[in-house]
Image (tube, grey):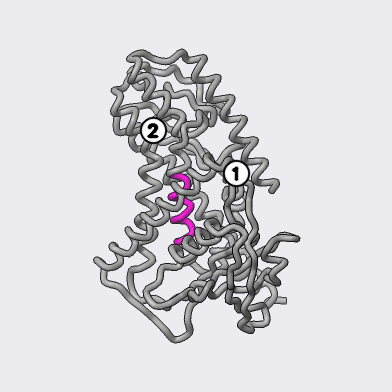
Amino acid sequence: MIATISTLAITKLYPLLLTAVGFGLLITIHEFGHFIFAKMFGIGVPVFSIGFGPSLIKKKVGSTEFRLSLIPLGGYCAIQGMSDPEAGMVDTGSEPENPAYSYESKAFWQKLLVLLGGILFNLVFAYGAFITLYIGTRPKMKTEFVVSSVPAKSPAEQGGIKAGDVITGYNGMTFGLKDSNPQEQLQEFLQTIAMNPQKKMTLTLATTERFAKIRRVRLGETEDKRGFLGVAIEMQTKPIDGEFESDTLSSAITKGVALTHFYIKSTISAITNMFCRRSLDSVGGPLAMFSQTFKSAQNGLRSLIQFMGTISVSLALMNLIPIGALDGGQLLFLLLEGIIRRPLPQRLKEGMIIASWFLFMGLVLILSYR
């Protein structure tokens, strides 16, 4: 009985705790970016909350009430004078607002930094997380490209590929060679698939029985003339028994910065493809992120740190999309007001924010259902 409880704690409860802490940390970092710049420029912040919904814990420090709320899939920093649907759905107190502490009363560059604060702090976290991965002596890791699912009647299924198979190479190329970058190798693999519709591809697999097999698959073709294999691939990192590696501080910084830049480029490419191809196939909702974070936590703290770094980059860049419910929407309003040199009508801004907020939440529900 004790052994069963201990196993459950190690395999389920501890990773779940790390996942919750990781999500809370990213939310706090993003909102703290807005908070610190607002405070720096003398803008009122009546409420700072981690999570949505009913408050579990409240504590007022100075003029700001800090809250820990029930639903952990978000958070908000209620900034005085800013139209924000997140802050508008909560009680920020009944104290009268001083116009001198309003966001609207500040200079253009100050408002710009307040809006960019969360994005900047997410990027700083990502750089720090990826640099941390390379600091000190650590077990040498190997990365495997594991097939997590194979849709029925897809080219992969017709070629005999099954969930659990590990793709070790393709067309005579082998993954995981010395000094290779797994992220870049996977990206090149996916680009090769996309650029070769209706052509045959040779895949080398380590199957679920751990036998090496070669499969020759004819790729499919999408409506926009791109090739597809029809598999979902997960990158899984595992330590190599008895092998260790280390980096100097300067080397760790160089590698961490390079890895951050890789994820920034990859995220920009994914966002661009989402709009150009009008497809949500590469987009995951909050449940998908929570699930992947949980899996990373099960693989250890280092795996969790790396995944949280990638999520932090995604949060930063997704928030730049000019949708009213995101920071990018507020940036769009600010830039338009700077061009026309007068405030936009408040009703127009609020209407656009509320409409985009409902659309955004609808997208979240669709992705979560999928």
Q: Residue under circle 1? A: 279
Residue 315 lies in the magenta-colored region: yes
* Circle count: 2
Picture residue at 48% right of the left edge, 52% below the top: 311
Of 14 and 366, which appears nearest the observer?
366
Q: Residue at x 38, y 24 (%)?
A: 334
Of the residues shown, which amino acid type is indicated by label 1? Answer: Ser
- Residue 305 image position (x, y, % from top left): 45, 61
Name the amino acid type tagged 2. Answer: Leu
Q: Can residue 72 be seen in the rendering of this structure? A: yes
Label 2 close to label 1 by CB (< 8 Å): no
Q: Residues within 10 Å of mark 2 (few under 14, many from 20)?
A: many
| Residues drawn in magenta | 305-316
Give the percent coordinates (x, y) of residue 39. 33, 32
Nearer to the camera, 215 or 275: 215
Mark 1: secondary structure: loop
